[in-house]
Image: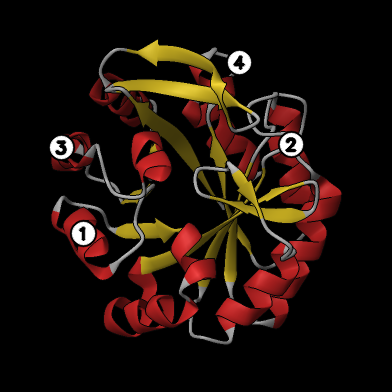
Amino acid sequence: MILYPAIDIRDGRAVRLMQGDYGRETAYDDDPLDAARRWLEQGARALHVVDLDGAREGEPQNLEHVRRIASEAEVPVQVGGGLRNADAVAAALEAGADRVVLGTAALSEPGLVAALAEDHGERIVVGVDARRGRVAVEGWERDTAATPAETIADLAGRGIGAFVFTPVDVDGTLGGPAVEELQEVATTAAEAGASLIYSGGIGTLDDLSALRNVGLGSLVGVIVGRALYEGRFTVAEGQAALDG
């Protein structure tokens, strides 16, 4: 299981949002590359970059930051935010992303996502963000009627093999992961033969150990943001907790 340090970019800075609320932002680094360098120095095996401006605007806004990060990182860089068509996906891959995370497009145009998966294979990941048990899209600002499990089952059937699951209600709170929600989603992913990365609520090393001990075979990674930025543990310590 891999720990993915999060680098969320808004207005050119590395920030974190509380429960996906753009009005509750904490800025940590004036340059996202500084955050990337810190996580790499601490032993990160991969990085998770989110273009928050792109998620809100519907098209990438921070690809130059992605390019700068990817040019220095000798580990895989996973990028999401505003990737809603083939051109945007191509631009993110050209900027150095090893994998791209699609969100809104996966619900609005599932056929497009299936086509992208056929073209790019394992480099296409779908982000499933949920609020109160329903999938949220467009930068978490619009709720839908679909459940995370339903969405994963449908898209796995269309050729998607990897997902990122975020229960927005706990994201950025440091209050612990939503284990019960994760278990349902991870079980669906396992039944579909897909892998899952979890994000949301991680505040302590015990939280990471709890996820490791849940024993969900489809769970292959955990994204951590605020806990790292606030120094609750290092990347190396977090990875050790996941390794057991």
Numbered disc 1: secondary structure: helix
Residue identifier under label 3: 64
In this orientation, which residue lies closer to the viewer: 63 or 68?
A: 63
Name the residue located 50 percent from the left edge and 48 percent from the top edge. 138
Sequence-wise, the earlier of marks 4 and 1 is 1
In this picture, is 143 found above or below 42? below
Q: Quadrant of residue 207?
A: top right
Q: Nearer the viewer, mark 2 or mark 1?
A: 2
Sequence-wise, the earlier of marks 4 and 2 is 2
Q: Quadrant of residue 183?
A: bottom right
Name the residue located 65 percent from the left edge and 71 percent from the top edge. 151
Marks 2 and 3, how far apart at CA: 30 Å
Q: Using the rendered image of the protein, determine whether residue 193 is visible from the camera's viewpoint.
A: no
CB under 8 Å between callouts 2 and 3? no
The crowd level at tag 4 (other Cα within 10 Å; few <14, some 14-19, many 20+) is some
Question: Which amino acid lies under the numbered mark 2 shown in the image of this protein?
Answer: Asp
Q: Nearer the viewer, mark 4 or mark 3?
A: 3
Residue identifier under label 4: 232
Marks 1 and 3, how far apart at CA: 12 Å
Marks 4 and 2, how far apart at CA: 21 Å
